Structures are given as structure tokens and as C-alpha cells.
Image (tube, rainbow, N blue to C red):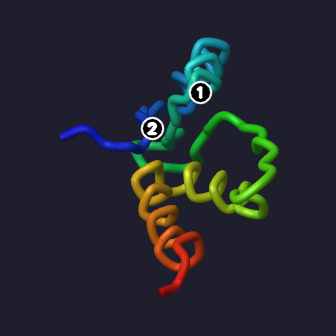
Amino acid sequence: MPTDTPAMTDVSIQELKQNLSAYLSRAEAGEALVVTRHGKPLVRIVAVTEPEVVVGPGFGKTKLRQVVRERVGDLALRTLDEDRRDRFDEPKA
């Protein structure tokens, strides 16, 4: 089943040190790296993304959208958008 979360790759500290440039390129391309020590997760490396400037109905939602996308993925972002649309964008009868 496809997911909306980015691919995550576990990589040991030693492997990361030996191939740092290659792993940084992969992270820059959107792949999340989980650095492990003795097989246990230590840190996550993800690309830094700049928030887009929003003017109009989406004003004020930019930072939250970016945080939600980075931390929990696009499916949660779509759910948040649907909830907002239900509560704020549709005229009340």
C-alpha cells in the first residue's frame, strides 16, 4: 500500500561517514535518513525546505502546512485541509 510519507533509510554512523556526500544528496532529494548507532535510531536527517509565500485564502496556513508535511506527511495535511474547509471556507447556511 503506498504511503504519503517520504522514504526513510537507516544508515549507520560508519556508513554515513564513508559516504557522506552521497547520503546528503539523497536527503536533499527528499529521502529521510535515520542515523543509527549499534542498530538503534539516533537522529534523522531531512532536507530543509523553504516555506512558500501564500497570499489569499491560504494566508497564515503556510508554516503549519510545512510543519505538518515534514513531521507526519501529506495524508495528514490533506485531512487538515478538509477539516479547515469544512469549518472555515464553506458559507454557513
- Secondary structure of residue under mark 1: helix
Residue found at x 52% / y 72%: 90
Mark 2 lies on a secondary structure that is loop
Check the image and name the residue furthest to the front: 93
Residue at image position (78%, 49%) is 54
- Disc nearest the viewer among 2 and 1: 2
Residue 22 drawn at (x, y percent): 59, 12
Q: Is residue 35 left or right of residue 51?
A: left
Residue placed most toward the observer, 77 or 81:
81
Where residue 52 appears, as percent x and y from the top left, is 76, 41
Please, what is the three-letter code of the amino acid marked with disc 1?
Answer: Ala
Q: Is residue 61 among what the camera can see?
A: yes
* Vertical position of residue 81 compared to residue 14: above or below: below
Whether residue 70 is situated above or below residue 10 in the rendered picture: below
- The foreground one among 10 and 48 is 48
**Disc 2 target residue:** 6
Q: In terms of sequence position, does the residue under pointer 2 or pointer 1 come before the other?
A: 2
Q: Quadrant of residue 63?
A: bottom right
Q: Is residue 18 visible?
A: no
The residue drawn where x is 52% and y is 36% is 32
Q: Which residue is mark 1?
A: 27
In this rendering, is residue 15 above or below 9? above
* Other-residue count near label 2 (Cα within 10 Å), few / some / many at <14 / 14–19 / ≥20: some
Residue 8, given in percent of the width and then of the height, sits at: 43, 37
Q: Point out the image quarter for the N terminus.
A: top left
